[in-house]
Every structure is written in C-alpha cells, then in structure tokens.
Image (cartoon, rainbow, N blue to C red):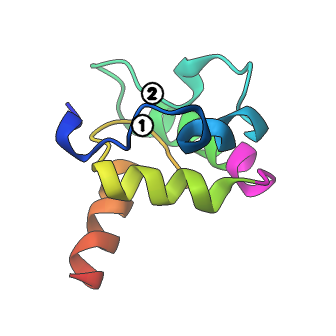
Amino acid sequence: MASIARLPMPIQETYEWQYQGACRGTDPETFFSPDAERGPRRRAREAAAKALCAVCPVVQECLNHALTVREPYGVWGGLNINERDQLLRKTG
C-alpha cells in the first residue's frame, strides 16, 4: 500500500491534474491487475493502459505522483510498478 505520509496535502489544487487524465472514466481494471493475472493477459492489459497514457495530457504529473508516493500497484504515468522501481533505483 502507498504510504500516506508521502501523499500531498488533501487540497483540490494538488489533485486537479487528475480531471484532465485520458484515463478518466476508464475502467480501473485497465490499470490494475487481478491477483492471479500473469503472462500474455497481463502484458495485453498493461499495453492497453500504456496506450491511454501515451496520449494523456497529464502523463508527467501522473508519473511524478506515482514516484513521489511510491504507488505500489498499477500503471501510472505510462509505467508499471517494475518500471517505476527501476526508474527510482536509477535516479537514486
């Protein structure tokens, strides 16, 4: 679970970027996998999520949020948890 200590202050301006997301109104299951999902099915779901991220006007804000709070699940800002972890390790 994401650490709530790293979450930004609960004020509207902090989260306003989410209203502009290409994912708004999309089924969350596109971005978050069921527990038993593996292999080709998981790759296909993540590819669909990343395709939405690729055309999203707030993809950088989304990724910044995920990296800051260390979102432990799902596709955020066009990256899955493993890709975000690699990016965090690389940037120290």
Which residue matches tag 1? 74
> Viewed as shown, does residue 21 lie left or right of 47?
right
Q: Where is residue 81 in the image (x, y as percent from the top left)?
A: 33, 50
Q: What element carries label 2?
A: loop
Instruction: State the residue in front, 54 or 18.
Output: 18
Per the model, the C-alpha gap separating discs 1 and 2 is 4 Å
Examine the rendering and report whether any part of residue 3 can be seen.
no
55 magenta-colored: yes
Q: What element carries label 1?
A: loop
Q: Where is residue 3 in the image (x, y as percent from the top left)?
A: 18, 38
Q: Which residue is rendered at x = 36% and y = 58% of the image?
A: 67
Q: Residues within 10 Å of mark 2 (few under 14, many from 20)?
A: some
Boundaries of the magenta span:
51-57
Which residue matches tag 2? 32
> Viewed as shown, does residue 41 lie left or right of 19?
left
**Residue 47, above or below 32:** below
Q: Residue 21 is drawn in which quadrant?
A: top right
Q: Which residue is rendered at x = 74% and y = 43% of the image?
A: 52
* Mark 1 in CB contact with mark 2 (< 8 angstroms): yes
75 magenta-colored: no
Examine the rendering and report whether any part of residue 18 can be seen.
yes
